[in-house]
Amino acid sequence: MTDETGNLVLEYMRRFSTQLSEFDKKLDRFTDDLHDLKVRMTNVEEGLAGVNRRLDRIETRLDRVERRLELVDMH
């Protein structure tokens, strides 16, 4: 009976070890995916900042054109 119990415990430990290894692999993939998302999000934020800078410059230039053409009140 002791041998059977020992084998049963050993079998459960093997299964647990296998499941833990699979979980570990999935967690590694999840961590890699999260890192990739952070990198992509940073790139999106930098791109958006660039677009905002361009819009600001366009707005400044448009204001200047409107003033030169006297399309706006100078109050």
Image: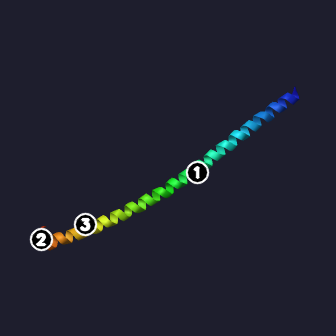
Residue 32 is left or right of residue 63, and the answer is: right
Instruction: Give me the disc on residue 23.
Output: none
Which is nearer the eye, 73 or 38? 38
In the depicted structure, whether residue 30 falls above or below residue 2? below
> Where is residue 58 shown, x and y percent of the image?
27, 67
Q: Amino acid at mark 3?
A: Glu
* Residue under the image location 48 percent in, 56 percent down: 40
Q: Amino acid at mark 1?
A: Thr
* Residue under the image location 54 percent in, 51 percent down: 34
> In this figure, which residue is indicated by the disc labeled 3?
59
In the depicted structure, whether residue 68 falls above or below residue 11? below
Residue 75 is left or right of residue 15, and the answer is: left
- Distance, label 3 to label 1, CA atoms, is 42 Å
Circle 2 Cα neighbour tier, 10 Å, few/some/many (<14 / 14–19 / ≥20):
few
Instruction: Give me the disc on residue 70.
Output: 2
Residue 68, quarter of picture: bottom left
> Where is residue 61 shown, x and y percent of the image?
24, 70
> In this figure, which residue is indicated by the disc labeled 1?
31
Nearer the N terminus, badge 3 or badge 1? 1
Task: State which quarter of the image contains the N terminus.
Answer: top right
In the depicted structure, whether residue 47 falls above or below residue 13? below
> Where is residue 36 shown, x and y percent of the image?
53, 55
* Residue under the image location 60 percent in, 49 percent down: 29
Residue placed farthest to the top in the image?
A: 1
Residue 66, quarter of picture: bottom left
